[in-house]
Amino acid sequence: MLHITGTARCISDLHLCPERADLAARFFNFLAATGEADVAALFILGDLFDAWIGDDDLDEPFNAKVCGELRKLADQGTPLYFLAGNRDFLIGEDFAAATGARLLPETMKVGAGGTATLLLHGDTLCTDDVDYQRFRTQVRDAAWQARFLSRPLAERRAEARSLRERSRQATRAKSMEIMDVNVASVRATLLAAGCRHMIHGHTHRPGCEHLTLDDGIAERWVLSDWDNGRGDALEIDANSIRRLDLSR
């Protein structure tokens, strides 16, 4: 568990890539504003990049620029935390060293007692999407990752493009219900963590849902993606969770 004193911010699903300079500009503006604000920590809950093919791609100009802007914020004294998503699960210790970010496990509790908030990317909650969960198990396997990372960068870039296209095609063939979270999985995850507050991304369905647990009411906050004129952050402290509109 992380004990954060003050207000922390959470973001997710920016899907940064060289082709979307508008998204990068909005992100850099957000980092500058966060540095000027009284923020105790910034949590990035996965899918910061549209694809991350390995830390040996850190010197690619766009990646280097993003990492440099994150390092500026860290050097100003704002703690950075990164929790992997389904697009950037290959981010590793070299990225952490370059940005000053601390890498987190798949779930992390922030706070204490009844006000603790559980942070996660959110894809583990989509248990009705059996095909995706099977794929997730495959690519999170250490042996699979070692084989992938041993391939030349050019091959990995091509494979990442292919995977994204296959993902888009598969998404079009699935119902929205299958790709959303499973409520039973949400409840089980909250109960296992001993939390009544959850923040995640992944589904691109921003909102706040109230759930009934055995010992009371819980809240599930969902972050927006940053595409199509959308974008937000959530601010959390000991007393509340608030949404910031970052669509412009």
Image (spheres, rainbow, N blue to C red):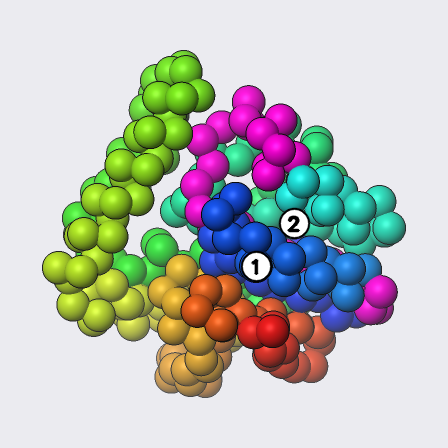
Q: Foreground residue, 147 or 104?
A: 147
Residue 58 lies within the magenta run: yes
Q: Which residue is drawn at the image coordinates 78% and 51% (left, top)?
A: 73
* Res. 210 visible in picture: yes
**Local crowd at mark 2 within 10 Å, few (<14), some, or many (≥20)?**
some
In this view, the mark in front (2 or 1): 1
- The three-letter code of the residue at mark 1 reads Asp
- What label sits on residue 22 in the rendered view? 1
Residue 192: x, y in percent? 43, 61
Label 2, label 1: how many angstroms apart (C-alpha)? 24 Å
Which quadrant does the C terminus fall into?
bottom right
Determine the secondary structure under disc 2: strand
Residue 198 visible? The answer is no
Q: Which mark is residue 81?
A: 2
Q: Quadrant of residue 57?
A: top right
Q: Is residue 148 left or right of residue 194?
A: left
Q: Position of residue 127 (x, y in %)?
A: 25, 58
Percent position (x, y) of residue 156?
37, 25
Residue furthest to the left in view is 173
The residue that appears at 38% across and 84% down in the rendered structure is 212
Quarter of the figure with the N terminus: bottom right
Q: Are marks 2 and 1 in contact (CB under 8 Å)?
A: no
Residue stretch rendered in magenta on the structure: 36-64
Mark carried by residue 205: none
Q: Amino acid at mark 2?
A: Tyr
